Image (spheres, rainbow, N blue to C red):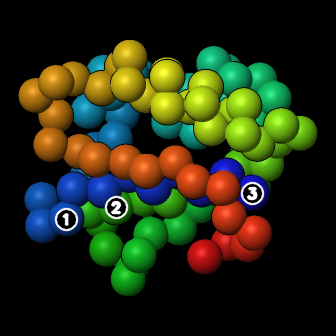
């Protein structure tokens, strides 16, 4: 399972799409850029609006993690305060 966690703790409401400069939902954006991804679930830590987590599945998770990082780095503004992590995990935690 691939965990993509976007966060900007203490910012209030995080607008991932605005931070990336995209017009579609970030999960659809990533799936359109990396078709082998399948969305499994979404959540946030502590039910706060300053972070959002997406879990994806894929045949080759290691390769997809690299692709996700490449896509996000190429779209996120250097002035953005949003941070993210992309990890492989065995469950939805």
Find residue 62 and report its image quarter: top right
46 in relation to 25, above or below: below
Q: Nearer the viewer, mark 3 or mark 1?
A: 3
Which class describes the residues within 10 Å of circle 3: few (<14), some (14-19), or many (20+)?
some
- 3D distance between C-alphas at marks 2 and 3: 19 Å
Q: Position of residue 16 (x, y in %)?
A: 34, 41
User: Which residue sits furthest right?
Assistant: 59
Quadrant in which residue 93 is drawn: bottom right
Q: Residue at left 72%, top 31%? A: 63
Disc 3 and disc 1: Cα gap in Å? 24 Å
Let me know if residue 13 appears in the view: no
Residue in view at x 30 percent, y 56 percent: 7
Q: Quadrant of residue 45?
A: bottom left
Q: Which residue is mark 3?
A: 1
- Residue linked to disc 2: 51
Residue tagged 1: 9
Say whether residue 3 is left or right of residue 8: right
Can you tell which mark lies on residue 34? none
First in sequence, mark 3 or 1: give its number. 3
Residue positioned 75% across, 69% down in the render: 90
CB under 8 Å between callouts 2 and 3?
A: no
CB contact under 8 Å: marks 1 and 2: yes
First reached walking from the N terminus: tag 2 or tag 3: 3
């Amino acid at each position: 399972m691939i965990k993509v966690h976007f966060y900007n703790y203490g910012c209030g409401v995080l607008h991932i799409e605005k931070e990336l400069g995209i017009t579609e939902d970030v999960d659809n954006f990533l799936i359109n850029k990396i078709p082998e991804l399948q969305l499994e679930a979404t959540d946030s830590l502590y039910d706060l609006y300053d972070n959002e987590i997406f879990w994806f599945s894929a045949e080759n998770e290691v390769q997809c993690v690299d692709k996700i990082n490449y896509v996000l780095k190429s779209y996120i503004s250097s002035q953005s305060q949003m941070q993210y992590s992309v990890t492989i995990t065995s469950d939805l935690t």
